[in-house]
Image (spheres, rainbow, N blue to C red):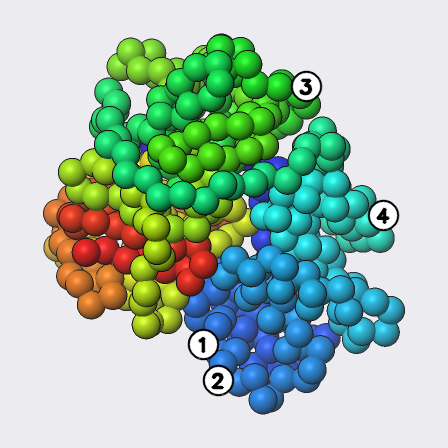
């Protein structure tokens, strides 16, 4: 079962390369922008390292700002953005608009919500006429969110090491206990969740500070759910204490799966997982925050698009979602492998959906071998979609079926790698 909610307000990184067209004479710059538009930050990094000397100083700073954001260096990204937004920096309005959006995302990652609000206000004031209606609507939704959160203190973590036995829920997903002064809540561990999420009844039970916000959150099937915000002033996961954690507060029904008698009450998403800097998950169900981070000597294979982790495998980029029970491959993978897929496998209907409903898509069930940091793993029944399900630019979404093939998975948000042992 996949966490089906993704906040519309967090669609921060949108197409760039289309804006780098005739105005930009540098072919290397266009190539890097094209990779960024596809959210292939790994390819963009490689192209930048190879062609940096052919870029103007302004173009170098622009790409460095984007890549610093993608590889979880929000402070460094903002330091590069500041001078580029000053008058006379040499970038056209279209690219300055993108920098404002990236700066908003940086402030979100830094939990500086008032600064994120200001970034959105400046963007709307300066470039509102350049935006499409859906982009403007998303930004206005963001503005509503950051305005509601502007007085919330920074999220803080008291460091410590932990080793916790996770429990499987009815859907087979790993659950961690979130402990507050009021109660304990079993929550899904989900790297694919942009924000932590909680039902209204659970927020009341844990005595979270609920802020009315009326934020629009999109379900996978296109249904829009209204969400408020909840602030957990102090929570504990094992020996790790985290303060001022923001939750989306949803109606209980929005996280209910009555067809199987299953109710989700809480989801611990990217902001909490990233704050722990490194987490390890073992095949036998332990969640570990190590005392010392893992040392690794290889190029990082993880990036962040907004608040969604990406992983590079076999030169392709995928979203990485511990809340998804199965890996799914998208149309871009199908098009690349089309002759072999059609020759080898029979077409099937693939159902996708969640609490908001279900849709069927044309596709295939295939066998495929992935190579991850020198280790091969074969999956025997992966869904490959023949048709698009949206504007996806990645090759697929990596889920628990691949993760379970290994004894231990390590997520490190300092060096930005995902390692399997």
Find out whether the residues at labels 1 and 2 contact each other: C-beta distance under 8 Å: yes
Where is 96 relative to 282, above or below?
below
Looking at the image, which residue is at 24% across and 26% down? Answer: 167
Q: Quadrant of the C terminus?
A: bottom left
**Above or below — where is 92 with respect to 400?**
below
Between marks 3 and 1 in the image, the one whose residue lies nearer the viewer: 3
Q: CA distance from mark 1 to mark 2?
A: 6 Å
Residue bearing mark 4: 125
Q: Residues within 10 Å of mark 2 (few under 14, many from 20)?
A: few
| Residue at figure coordinates x 48%, y 72% from the top left | 45
| Mark closest to the chain's N terminus, 4 or 1 | 1
* Residue indicated by mark 3: 212
Q: Residues within 10 Å of mark 3 (few under 14, many from 20)?
A: few
Q: Secondary structure at mark 4?
A: helix
Q: Which quarter of the figure is the N terminus placed in?
A: top left
Q: Position of residue 292 (x, y in %)?
A: 35, 55
Q: Which residue is mark 2?
A: 50
For the residues bearing labels 4 and 2, Cβ distance under 8 angstroms: no
Rendering coords of residue 211 (x, y %): 67, 21
Q: CA distance from mark 3 to mark 4?
A: 25 Å
**Residue 37: quarter of image:** bottom right
């Amino acid at each position: 079962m996949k966490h089906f909610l993704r906040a519309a307000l967090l669609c921060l990184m949108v197409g760039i390369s289309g804006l780098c067209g005739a105005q930009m004479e540098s072919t290397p710059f266009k190539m890097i922008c094209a990779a960024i538009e596809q959210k292939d930050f790994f390819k963009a990094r490689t192209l930048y390292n190879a062609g940096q000397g052919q870029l103007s100083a302004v173009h170098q700073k622009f790409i460095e700002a984007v890549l610093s954001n993608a590889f979880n260096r929000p402070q460094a990204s903002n330091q590069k953005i500041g001078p580029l937004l000053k008058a006379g920096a040499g970038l056209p309005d279209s690219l300055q608009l993108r920098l404002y959006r990236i700066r908003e995302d940086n402030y979100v990652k830094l939990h500086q919500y008032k600064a994120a609000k200001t970034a959105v206000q400046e963007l709307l004031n300066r470039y509102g006429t350049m935006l499409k209606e859906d982009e403007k609507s998303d930004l206005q939704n963001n503005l509503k969110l950051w305005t509601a959160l502007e007085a919330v203190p920074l999220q803080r973590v008291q460091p410590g090491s932990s080793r916790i036995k996770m429990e499987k829920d009815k859907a087979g997903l790993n659950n961690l206990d979130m402990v507050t002064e009021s109660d304990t809540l079993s929550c899904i561990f989900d790297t694919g969740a942009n924000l932590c999420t909680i039902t209204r009844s659970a927020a009341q039970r844990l005595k979270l500070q609920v802020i009315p916000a009326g934020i629009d959150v999109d379900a996978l099937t296109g249904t829009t759910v209204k969400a408020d915000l909840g602030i957990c002033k102090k929570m504990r996961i094992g020996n790790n204490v985290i303060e001022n954690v923001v939750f989306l507060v949803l109606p209980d029904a929005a996280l209910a799966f009555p067809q199987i008698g299953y109710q989700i009450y809480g989801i611990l998403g990217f902001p909490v997982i990233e704050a722990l800097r490194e987490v390890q998950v073992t095949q036998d169900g332990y969640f570990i925050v190590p005392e010392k981070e893992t040392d690794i000597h290889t190029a990082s294979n993880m990036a962040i698009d907004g608040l969604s982790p990406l992983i590079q495998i076999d030169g392709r980029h995928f979203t990485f979602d511990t809340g998804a029970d199965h890996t799914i491959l998208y149309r871009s993978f199908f098009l690349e492998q089309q002759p072999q897929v059609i020759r080898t496998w029979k077409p099937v209907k693939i159902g996708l959906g969640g609490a908001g409903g279900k849709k069927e898509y044309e596709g295939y069930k295939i066998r495929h071998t992935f190579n991850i940091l020198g280790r091969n793993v074969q999956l025997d029944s992966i869904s490959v979609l023949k048709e698009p399900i949206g504007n996806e630019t990645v090759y697929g979404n990596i889920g628990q079926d691949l993760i379970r093939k290994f004894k231990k998975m390590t997520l490190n948000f300092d060096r930005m790698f995902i390692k399997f042992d």
